[in-house]
Image: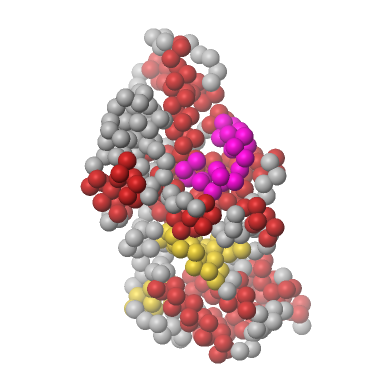
Amino acid sequence: MEKQKKNLSKNLLKGTLVAGALLSVSALSAAPQSSNLFDYSVLGSGAEVRSELLHTTPSPADVFEAKCGEKKEAKKSEGKSEEGKCGEGKCGEKSSEKSKEKASKKKAEAKKESKSGEGKCGEGKCGEGKCGDK
Amino acid sequence: MLLKTETYQHQKTLAEYCRNGKEITLPGAITERLPHYRRLVFNIVNDSLESAFPIAFKYVERVHWNEMVVDFFSNHKCTDPQVWRMPFEFYGYVVEKEFHEKYSLPWLNDLLYFEWLEVELYMMEDIQYPLYKDSENWLGKLVAVNPEHKLIKLKYPIHKMNPKKAKENKGDHFLLLFRQKDSGKVQFVGLSTLYVFILENIFIGTKKLDEILNDVLYFFGINDMELLQKNTHSFLTDLKSKGFVLGIYK
Protein backbone atom coordinates (compact mmCIF):
# COMPACT_ATOMS: atom_id res chain seq x y z
CA MET A 1 0.00 0.00 0.00
CA GLU A 2 2.75 2.35 1.02
CA LYS A 3 4.67 1.39 -2.11
CA GLN A 4 1.67 2.08 -4.35
CA LYS A 5 1.20 5.42 -2.71
CA LYS A 6 4.84 6.27 -3.32
CA ASN A 7 4.66 5.35 -6.99
CA LEU A 8 1.52 7.40 -7.52
CA SER A 9 3.11 10.29 -5.68
CA LYS A 10 6.21 10.09 -7.83
CA ASN A 11 4.15 10.51 -10.97
CA LEU A 12 2.04 13.32 -9.65
CA LEU A 13 4.92 15.23 -8.14
CA LYS A 14 7.34 14.88 -11.00
CA GLY A 15 9.21 18.10 -11.56
CA THR A 16 7.94 19.89 -8.49
CA LEU A 17 10.10 21.51 -5.84
CA VAL A 18 8.44 19.59 -3.05
CA ALA A 19 8.89 16.19 -4.66
CA GLY A 20 11.98 15.24 -2.69
CA ALA A 21 10.59 16.46 0.58
CA LEU A 22 7.21 14.80 0.06
CA LEU A 23 8.54 11.47 -1.02
CA SER A 24 10.58 11.12 2.09
CA VAL A 25 9.08 8.74 4.59
CA SER A 26 8.80 11.41 7.24
CA ALA A 27 6.61 13.66 5.10
CA LEU A 28 4.25 10.92 4.01
CA SER A 29 3.69 9.83 7.52
CA ALA A 30 3.47 13.33 8.91
CA ALA A 31 1.13 13.61 11.84
CA PRO A 32 -2.06 15.45 10.90
CA GLN A 33 -1.74 17.89 13.75
CA SER A 34 1.89 18.55 13.04
CA SER A 35 2.00 22.30 13.52
CA ASN A 36 4.97 22.91 11.24
CA LEU A 37 2.90 21.81 8.24
CA PHE A 38 1.17 25.17 8.48
CA ASP A 39 4.23 27.22 9.30
CA TYR A 40 5.26 30.14 7.19
CA SER A 41 7.14 33.30 7.97
CA VAL A 42 6.76 36.62 6.22
CA LEU A 43 10.31 37.88 6.36
CA GLY A 44 9.65 41.24 4.76
CA SER A 45 11.62 43.07 2.12
CA GLY A 46 15.24 42.46 1.24
CA ALA A 47 16.29 45.36 3.42
CA GLU A 48 14.39 43.91 6.37
CA VAL A 49 15.91 40.47 5.86
CA ARG A 50 19.39 42.00 5.70
CA SER A 51 18.63 44.13 8.70
CA GLU A 52 17.94 40.95 10.64
CA LEU A 53 21.08 39.24 9.44
CA LEU A 54 23.43 42.19 9.30
CA HIS A 55 21.88 44.99 11.32
CA THR A 56 22.19 47.26 8.30
CA THR A 57 19.87 48.15 5.46
CA PRO A 58 21.66 48.34 2.14
CA SER A 59 19.93 46.85 -0.88
CA PRO A 60 22.08 45.06 -3.41
CA ALA A 61 19.45 45.89 -5.98
CA ASP A 62 19.82 49.58 -5.27
CA VAL A 63 23.53 49.56 -5.72
CA PHE A 64 23.22 49.31 -9.45
CA GLU A 65 21.34 52.54 -9.42
CA ALA A 66 23.67 54.38 -7.10
CA LYS A 67 25.96 55.70 -9.65
CA CYS A 68 29.20 57.40 -9.76
CA GLY A 69 28.98 60.31 -7.39
CA GLU A 70 25.42 60.52 -6.21
CA LYS A 71 24.91 63.20 -3.64
CA LYS A 72 25.47 61.86 -0.21
CA GLU A 73 22.12 63.04 1.21
CA ALA A 74 20.21 61.50 -1.62
CA LYS A 75 21.83 58.18 -0.92
CA LYS A 76 21.24 58.38 2.78
CA SER A 77 17.62 59.21 2.35
CA GLU A 78 17.08 55.98 0.47
CA GLY A 79 19.29 53.91 2.68
CA LYS A 80 21.50 53.04 -0.23
CA SER A 81 24.61 51.12 0.30
CA GLU A 82 28.17 51.76 -0.60
CA GLU A 83 29.85 54.79 -2.03
CA GLY A 84 29.66 55.64 -5.71
CA LYS A 85 30.55 53.27 -8.44
CA CYS A 86 33.48 54.84 -10.11
CA GLY A 87 36.32 52.80 -8.82
CA GLU A 88 36.84 55.22 -6.00
CA GLY A 89 33.43 56.83 -5.89
CA LYS A 90 34.28 60.46 -5.86
CA CYS A 91 32.92 62.10 -8.94
CA GLY A 92 29.75 63.28 -10.57
CA GLU A 93 26.53 64.60 -9.27
CA LYS A 94 23.01 63.43 -9.22
CA SER A 95 20.02 65.60 -8.42
CA SER A 96 17.73 64.79 -5.54
CA GLU A 97 14.88 64.57 -8.05
CA LYS A 98 16.56 61.44 -9.20
CA SER A 99 16.07 59.73 -5.90
CA LYS A 100 12.48 60.90 -5.70
CA GLU A 101 11.84 59.37 -9.06
CA LYS A 102 13.37 56.18 -7.83
CA ALA A 103 11.27 56.23 -4.70
CA SER A 104 8.13 56.53 -6.77
CA LYS A 105 9.39 53.47 -8.61
CA LYS A 106 9.08 54.21 -12.23
CA LYS A 107 10.39 50.82 -13.05
CA ALA A 108 11.25 51.33 -16.66
CA GLU A 109 13.31 54.39 -15.93
CA ALA A 110 14.86 52.81 -12.93
CA LYS A 111 15.96 49.87 -15.00
CA LYS A 112 17.46 52.09 -17.63
CA GLU A 113 19.35 54.02 -15.03
CA SER A 114 20.58 50.85 -13.49
CA LYS A 115 22.67 50.19 -16.51
CA SER A 116 24.76 53.17 -15.70
CA GLY A 117 26.58 50.78 -13.45
CA GLU A 118 28.40 49.71 -16.56
CA GLY A 119 29.30 53.09 -17.15
CA LYS A 120 31.09 56.20 -17.24
CA CYS A 121 33.29 55.64 -14.32
CA GLY A 122 36.53 53.87 -14.06
CA GLU A 123 37.30 55.25 -17.46
CA GLY A 124 39.49 58.03 -16.36
CA LYS A 125 37.08 60.85 -15.73
CA CYS A 126 36.58 59.86 -12.19
CA GLY A 127 38.36 57.73 -9.74
CA GLU A 128 40.97 60.37 -9.15
CA GLY A 129 38.99 61.91 -6.34
CA LYS A 130 38.84 65.38 -7.77
CA CYS A 131 35.48 65.94 -9.27
CA GLY A 132 31.91 66.37 -8.17
CA ASP A 133 30.39 67.29 -4.93
CA LYS A 134 29.78 64.76 -2.36
CA MET B 1 31.17 51.62 -33.40
CA LEU B 2 33.70 50.21 -35.81
CA LEU B 3 37.23 50.22 -34.52
CA LYS B 4 40.46 49.98 -36.41
CA THR B 5 42.01 46.58 -35.92
CA GLU B 6 44.97 48.18 -34.22
CA THR B 7 42.78 50.11 -31.78
CA TYR B 8 40.82 46.97 -31.01
CA GLN B 9 44.04 45.10 -30.27
CA HIS B 10 45.26 47.85 -27.95
CA GLN B 11 41.96 47.86 -26.10
CA LYS B 12 42.04 44.12 -25.81
CA THR B 13 45.59 44.16 -24.50
CA LEU B 14 44.70 46.79 -21.92
CA ALA B 15 41.60 44.85 -20.88
CA GLU B 16 43.65 41.67 -20.46
CA TYR B 17 46.16 43.56 -18.37
CA CYS B 18 43.41 45.01 -16.20
CA ARG B 19 42.16 41.53 -15.50
CA ASN B 20 45.34 39.56 -14.95
CA GLY B 21 47.96 42.21 -14.18
CA LYS B 22 50.55 40.63 -16.47
CA GLU B 23 52.92 43.29 -17.72
CA ILE B 24 52.26 44.69 -21.18
CA THR B 25 53.68 47.27 -23.54
CA LEU B 26 51.17 49.59 -25.11
CA PRO B 27 52.29 52.15 -27.67
CA GLY B 28 51.68 55.63 -26.31
CA ALA B 29 50.81 54.46 -22.80
CA ILE B 30 52.88 55.43 -19.78
CA THR B 31 53.69 52.09 -18.23
CA GLU B 32 53.83 53.23 -14.63
CA ARG B 33 50.29 54.61 -14.88
CA LEU B 34 48.73 51.41 -16.15
CA PRO B 35 48.30 49.87 -12.68
CA HIS B 36 45.81 52.63 -11.89
CA TYR B 37 43.50 51.33 -14.63
CA ARG B 38 43.70 47.85 -13.21
CA ARG B 39 43.07 49.14 -9.72
CA LEU B 40 40.05 51.20 -10.76
CA VAL B 41 38.46 48.44 -12.81
CA PHE B 42 39.06 45.93 -10.04
CA ASN B 43 37.53 48.33 -7.54
CA ILE B 44 34.33 48.49 -9.59
CA VAL B 45 34.10 44.71 -9.82
CA ASN B 46 34.94 44.21 -6.18
CA ASP B 47 32.55 46.90 -5.04
CA SER B 48 29.70 45.53 -7.16
CA LEU B 49 30.18 42.08 -5.70
CA GLU B 50 30.43 43.29 -2.13
CA SER B 51 27.27 45.29 -2.63
CA ALA B 52 25.37 42.50 -4.33
CA PHE B 53 26.35 39.98 -1.66
CA PRO B 54 26.53 41.94 1.61
CA ILE B 55 25.68 38.93 3.76
CA ALA B 56 28.20 36.65 2.11
CA PHE B 57 30.78 39.42 2.29
CA LYS B 58 30.21 39.66 6.00
CA TYR B 59 30.37 35.96 6.76
CA VAL B 60 33.09 34.78 4.41
CA GLU B 61 36.56 35.39 5.81
CA ARG B 62 38.07 38.41 4.13
CA VAL B 63 41.07 36.51 2.82
CA HIS B 64 38.81 33.90 1.22
CA TRP B 65 36.49 36.52 -0.21
CA ASN B 66 39.42 38.35 -1.78
CA GLU B 67 40.78 35.12 -3.25
CA MET B 68 37.44 34.34 -4.86
CA VAL B 69 37.04 37.82 -6.31
CA VAL B 70 40.59 37.99 -7.65
CA ASP B 71 40.26 34.51 -9.14
CA PHE B 72 36.95 35.46 -10.77
CA PHE B 73 38.26 38.79 -12.03
CA SER B 74 41.39 37.25 -13.49
CA ASN B 75 40.01 34.09 -15.01
CA HIS B 76 36.34 34.45 -15.77
CA LYS B 77 35.32 36.02 -19.04
CA CYS B 78 31.97 37.58 -18.34
CA THR B 79 29.50 36.87 -21.10
CA ASP B 80 26.94 39.51 -20.24
CA PRO B 81 27.72 43.15 -21.01
CA GLN B 82 25.45 44.38 -18.25
CA VAL B 83 27.35 44.98 -15.04
CA TRP B 84 24.33 44.32 -12.84
CA ARG B 85 24.32 40.72 -14.05
CA MET B 86 27.95 40.18 -13.12
CA PRO B 87 27.12 38.94 -9.59
CA PHE B 88 25.20 36.08 -11.17
CA GLU B 89 28.27 35.14 -13.17
CA PHE B 90 30.28 35.33 -9.97
CA TYR B 91 27.81 32.98 -8.31
CA GLY B 92 28.13 30.56 -11.23
CA TYR B 93 31.90 30.76 -11.04
CA VAL B 94 31.92 30.07 -7.31
CA VAL B 95 29.69 27.03 -7.81
CA GLU B 96 31.80 25.75 -10.70
CA LYS B 97 35.06 26.16 -8.79
CA GLU B 98 33.55 24.56 -5.68
CA PHE B 99 34.83 27.23 -3.35
CA HIS B 100 32.32 26.04 -0.77
CA GLU B 101 34.36 22.88 -0.39
CA LYS B 102 37.72 24.57 -0.61
CA TYR B 103 36.82 26.93 2.24
CA SER B 104 34.48 24.56 4.10
CA LEU B 105 31.49 26.86 3.68
CA PRO B 106 28.65 24.47 2.82
CA TRP B 107 26.10 27.31 2.85
CA LEU B 108 28.03 29.52 0.41
CA ASN B 109 26.21 28.56 -2.80
CA ASP B 110 22.81 28.89 -1.16
CA LEU B 111 23.67 32.28 0.25
CA LEU B 112 25.02 33.72 -3.00
CA TYR B 113 22.00 32.43 -4.90
CA PHE B 114 19.60 33.81 -2.31
CA GLU B 115 21.26 37.23 -2.41
CA TRP B 116 21.43 37.27 -6.20
CA LEU B 117 17.74 36.48 -6.61
CA GLU B 118 16.73 39.73 -5.00
CA VAL B 119 18.70 41.62 -7.64
CA GLU B 120 17.33 39.46 -10.43
CA LEU B 121 13.72 39.87 -9.34
CA TYR B 122 14.10 43.58 -8.72
CA MET B 123 15.59 44.14 -12.15
CA MET B 124 13.54 41.67 -14.16
CA GLU B 125 11.29 42.85 -16.94
CA ASP B 126 7.67 43.33 -16.04
CA ILE B 127 5.48 40.28 -16.51
CA GLN B 128 1.89 40.87 -17.47
CA TYR B 129 -0.53 40.23 -14.62
CA PRO B 130 -3.38 37.79 -15.26
CA LEU B 131 -6.95 38.99 -15.59
CA TYR B 132 -8.28 38.55 -12.10
CA LYS B 133 -11.11 39.52 -9.82
CA ASP B 134 -10.52 40.75 -6.30
CA SER B 135 -11.89 38.03 -4.04
CA GLU B 136 -11.05 36.00 -0.98
CA ASN B 137 -13.57 33.32 -1.74
CA TRP B 138 -11.05 30.93 -3.19
CA LEU B 139 -12.61 27.52 -2.75
CA GLY B 140 -13.90 26.20 -6.06
CA LYS B 141 -11.89 28.84 -7.94
CA LEU B 142 -8.55 29.19 -9.66
CA VAL B 143 -6.38 31.39 -7.47
CA ALA B 144 -4.54 34.21 -9.26
CA VAL B 145 -1.10 35.21 -8.04
CA ASN B 146 1.55 37.80 -8.81
CA PRO B 147 3.56 36.37 -11.73
CA GLU B 148 6.75 38.19 -10.71
CA HIS B 149 7.97 35.60 -8.27
CA LYS B 150 10.44 32.80 -7.61
CA LEU B 151 9.98 29.77 -5.44
CA ILE B 152 13.22 28.13 -4.39
CA LYS B 153 14.53 25.35 -2.23
CA LEU B 154 17.62 25.86 -0.11
CA LYS B 155 19.69 23.37 1.81
CA TYR B 156 20.47 25.83 4.58
CA PRO B 157 18.07 28.36 6.12
CA ILE B 158 20.35 31.30 5.38
CA HIS B 159 17.30 33.54 5.01
CA LYS B 160 16.37 33.06 8.65
CA MET B 161 19.64 32.98 10.52
CA ASN B 162 23.28 33.77 10.05
CA PRO B 163 25.19 31.21 8.01
CA LYS B 164 27.09 29.83 10.97
CA LYS B 165 23.84 28.82 12.65
CA ALA B 166 22.24 27.82 9.36
CA LYS B 167 25.05 25.30 8.87
CA GLU B 168 23.60 23.26 11.72
CA ASN B 169 20.12 23.18 10.15
CA LYS B 170 20.61 21.42 6.85
CA GLY B 171 17.36 20.26 5.28
CA ASP B 172 14.68 21.33 2.84
CA HIS B 173 14.01 25.01 3.27
CA PHE B 174 11.58 26.72 0.92
CA LEU B 175 11.48 30.37 0.13
CA LEU B 176 9.10 32.48 -1.91
CA LEU B 177 10.31 35.78 -3.35
CA PHE B 178 8.07 38.18 -5.19
CA ARG B 179 8.19 41.74 -6.44
CA GLN B 180 5.49 44.01 -5.14
CA LYS B 181 3.73 45.81 -7.92
CA ASP B 182 3.58 49.28 -6.41
CA SER B 183 6.83 49.58 -4.52
CA GLY B 184 8.95 47.28 -6.66
CA LYS B 185 10.36 45.86 -3.43
CA VAL B 186 11.22 42.20 -3.32
CA GLN B 187 9.48 40.40 -0.47
CA PHE B 188 10.57 37.13 1.14
CA VAL B 189 8.37 34.45 2.68
CA GLY B 190 9.63 31.23 4.26
CA LEU B 191 7.27 28.32 3.59
CA SER B 192 6.46 24.87 4.90
CA THR B 193 6.38 21.93 2.49
CA LEU B 194 2.59 21.93 2.61
CA TYR B 195 2.29 25.54 1.51
CA VAL B 196 4.87 25.00 -1.24
CA PHE B 197 2.73 22.12 -2.48
CA ILE B 198 -0.34 24.37 -2.54
CA LEU B 199 1.49 27.23 -4.26
CA GLU B 200 3.09 25.01 -6.90
CA ASN B 201 -0.35 23.69 -7.77
CA ILE B 202 -1.74 27.20 -7.90
CA PHE B 203 1.08 28.20 -10.27
CA ILE B 204 0.26 25.31 -12.59
CA GLY B 205 -3.19 26.85 -12.80
CA THR B 206 -5.26 23.81 -13.68
CA LYS B 207 -6.75 22.91 -10.31
CA LYS B 208 -9.21 24.82 -8.23
CA LEU B 209 -8.30 25.38 -4.61
CA ASP B 210 -10.63 22.72 -3.23
CA GLU B 211 -9.11 20.17 -5.63
CA ILE B 212 -5.65 21.16 -4.49
CA LEU B 213 -6.69 20.78 -0.85
CA ASN B 214 -8.04 17.31 -1.56
CA ASP B 215 -4.60 16.40 -2.91
CA VAL B 216 -3.07 17.85 0.24
CA LEU B 217 -5.21 15.51 2.36
CA TYR B 218 -3.91 12.61 0.34
CA PHE B 219 -0.25 13.52 0.21
CA PHE B 220 0.14 14.76 3.75
CA GLY B 221 -2.12 12.27 5.46
CA ILE B 222 -4.27 15.00 6.96
CA ASN B 223 -7.84 14.07 7.79
CA ASP B 224 -9.16 17.38 9.03
CA MET B 225 -10.37 19.35 6.00
CA GLU B 226 -11.79 22.12 8.14
CA LEU B 227 -8.42 22.76 9.75
CA LEU B 228 -6.72 22.68 6.38
CA GLN B 229 -9.19 25.11 4.82
CA LYS B 230 -8.98 27.48 7.75
CA ASN B 231 -5.19 27.59 7.75
CA THR B 232 -4.95 27.85 3.98
CA HIS B 233 -7.45 30.69 3.91
CA SER B 234 -5.52 32.59 6.52
CA PHE B 235 -2.26 31.96 4.63
CA LEU B 236 -3.67 33.16 1.30
CA THR B 237 -5.29 36.18 2.92
CA ASP B 238 -1.98 37.15 4.46
CA LEU B 239 -0.19 36.80 1.12
CA LYS B 240 -2.93 38.85 -0.51
CA SER B 241 -2.31 41.68 1.91
CA LYS B 242 1.35 41.60 0.88
CA GLY B 243 0.55 41.77 -2.82
CA PHE B 244 1.33 38.21 -3.81
CA VAL B 245 -2.09 36.61 -4.04
CA LEU B 246 -4.25 38.74 -6.30
CA GLY B 247 -7.68 37.12 -6.12
CA ILE B 248 -9.32 34.67 -8.49
CA TYR B 249 -9.14 34.28 -12.25
CA LYS B 250 -11.91 35.98 -14.20
**Closer to the camera in the image, B194 or B108:** B108
Q: Is residue A7 visible?
A: no
User: Residue at left 64%, top 88%?
Assistant: B223
Split into 4 quadrants, where in the image is the N terminus of chain A? Answer: bottom right
Query: Considering only vertical position in the picture, is B50 above or below B155?
Result: above
Please tell me whether residue B235 is drawn above or below residue B140 in the rendered image.
Answer: above
Residue A122 in picture, x, y percent from top left = 39, 28
Looking at the rendered image, the quarter that the C terminus of chain A falls into is: top left
Q: Is residue B67 magenta?
A: yes
Asked whether A91 or A26 is in front, the reply is A91
Q: Quadrant of residue B156?
A: bottom right
Residue B234 horizontal/vertical position (percent)? 48, 80
Q: Is residue B116 visible?
A: yes
Judged by its main secondary structure, the magenta piece is helix
**Is residue B127 found left or right of B99 in the rendered image?**
left
Say which residue appears at 49% left-offset and 77% top-offset.
B235
Color theme of the render: secondary structure
The residue positioned 49% from the left and 64% from the top of the image is A43
The x and y percentages for residue B144 are 41, 74
| Horizontal side, residue B135 vs residue A43: left or right | left
Q: Magenta stretch: residue B210 in it?
A: no
Q: Look at the image and give the residue range highlighted in magenta.
A: B50-72
Identify the residue shown where x is 49% and y is 68%.
Answer: A42
User: Which quadrant of the structure image shows residue B242?
Assistant: bottom left
Specify whether B62 is left or right of B16.
right
